Image (cartoon, rainbow, N blue to C red):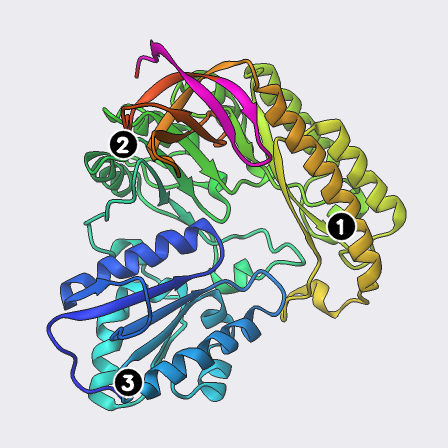
Amino acid sequence: MNATPKNTRKLHVVTHGCQMNVYDSARMADVLAPLGYTTVDSPEGADMVIMNTCHIRERAAEKVFSALGRLRDLKEAGGGTMMIAVTGCVAQAEGDILLQRAPYVDLVVGPQAYHRLPELIAQVHRTRKSAIDTDFPAEKKFDFLPDEAAAQGVIANLTIQEGCDKFCSFCVVPYTRGSEASRPAASIIAEAKRMVALGTREIALLGQNVNAYHGEGLDGRGWSLARLMAELAEIPGLLRLRYTTSHPSDMTEDLILAHRDNPALMPFLHLPVQSGSDKMLAAMNRKHKADDFRAIVARLREVRPDMAFTSDFIVGHPGETDADFAATMALIRETEFALAYSFKYSPRPGTPAAGLPQLDDALMDARLYELQAELRRQQDAFNASTVGLVTPVLFTGLGRYPGQIAGRSLYAQPVVVESPEALTGEIKMVKITHANPNSLLGSLKKEVLAA
């Protein structure tokens, strides 16, 4: 085990998975900063390496063990002084197995215990033994994280909700992140203000089921996500708001109307539906039907005609027939998505669907190919539809090549224009001149959009 650390230490964080893991990685660095840890870009020579893991995709644990093997070699080459920590959902789900298979790992910490990292590090140094904390404590981790918010850039993430009570048959989140918990509004608003003071102009509010937000408001009452965003929109200098990931069952009318009434809220919503078949939605325990999703999309387009949507789809969930897959394809063609994410079903240990008869892998591959081809067509069509439009772009920094500046559209598309000015943090009107598969090109207009 490691010797007592020096006053100045190098920290390397590897992040896998969702935006919430990105946020958590930044907050772990914040927690460790008072101990003298500064982040570095490479594990070579680091005093501590944190591998923040995701358990959603297939063979997640095996990929972690493969990466840990490389870290073990670095640790041994450095005389064994590097501390290795595994955090995130793989740590939560398979902590004991991790330590059995990789005894050179010093720390295994679940998502609810990041605030205890300094204490756990001290325990490892004191006992010369690995430490594990994968409990779900009664107190919320948000109450113990430091107030400081590291500068994330013009566009930043802010976690406001964690955990999920939906228990979809394919998903490990309720088992690795626990039940739904919402941060108090005062804590969120204070952090958002610090972020804006550091240059953030767009904030994406994060949660495993973010539209189930029900945190304590400034008035002592429970606030909805719509009420919280109304307060955040009043922060001077905060120009744009987004939220992800949502569940159709929690798309309340006040949240729908927020897309009409809150000028900071972008007309772009990630709303996972997973399947277009009611039979499969029931098998997935999604608690909504395909027509419920259609009704939400129609209502949002009614109150905000320029709304665009992204979604998630799972192909090959146990029991999916050709008819079920056809229903999914019909829903996709009917909705017309700006962007969507799709995956083959992969059994996650401990979830209800994992024990059911699995579909043939080749069949799932064929269905996924067909589905992704349609989604690619829709994304290309959506991007092409923006050509010729004059639209507000929030500039985030310099482009890849000299003389270019880059930003984001209302729909989070990367936009590149030529300009002698950096314009970072400003919103300017841009005429879109060309659509690439994953980005847009434009020319800067003289008009400036009022903040």
Q: Position of residue 10 (x, y in %)?
A: 22, 69
Q: Mark 2 or 1 closer to N-term?
A: 2
Q: Which residue in the rendered view is the most extreme toward the front?
A: 402
Q: Could you tell me which residue is drawn at 75 percent across and 37 percent down?
A: 374
Q: Which residue in the rendered view is the most extreme toward the top?
A: 447
Q: Which residues are magenta?
A: 432-450
Q: Secondary structure at mark 2?
A: loop
Q: Could you tell me which residue is drawn at 48 percent across and 52 percent down?
A: 18
Q: Nearer the viewer, residue 317 or 344?
A: 344
The verdict on residue 188 being magenta is: no
Of marks 2 and 3, the one in the foreground: 3
Q: Position of residue 61 (x, y in %)?
A: 55, 73
Q: Which residue in the rendered view is the most extreme toward the left?
A: 7
Residue 62 sits in quarter:
bottom right
The image quadrant where one finds the N terminus is bottom left
Residue count near mark 3 (Cα–Cα under 10 Å), binned few <14, some 14–19, many ≥20? some
Q: Mark 2 highlights which residue?
A: 219
Question: CB of mark 2 within 8 Å of CB of mark 3?
Answer: no
- Whether residue 120 is situated above or below residue 346 in the rendered picture: below
- What's the residue type where badge 1 is placed? Leu
Q: Mark 3 highlights which residue?
A: 78
Q: Main secondary structure of the magenta part?
A: strand
Q: Which mark is residue 368?
A: 1
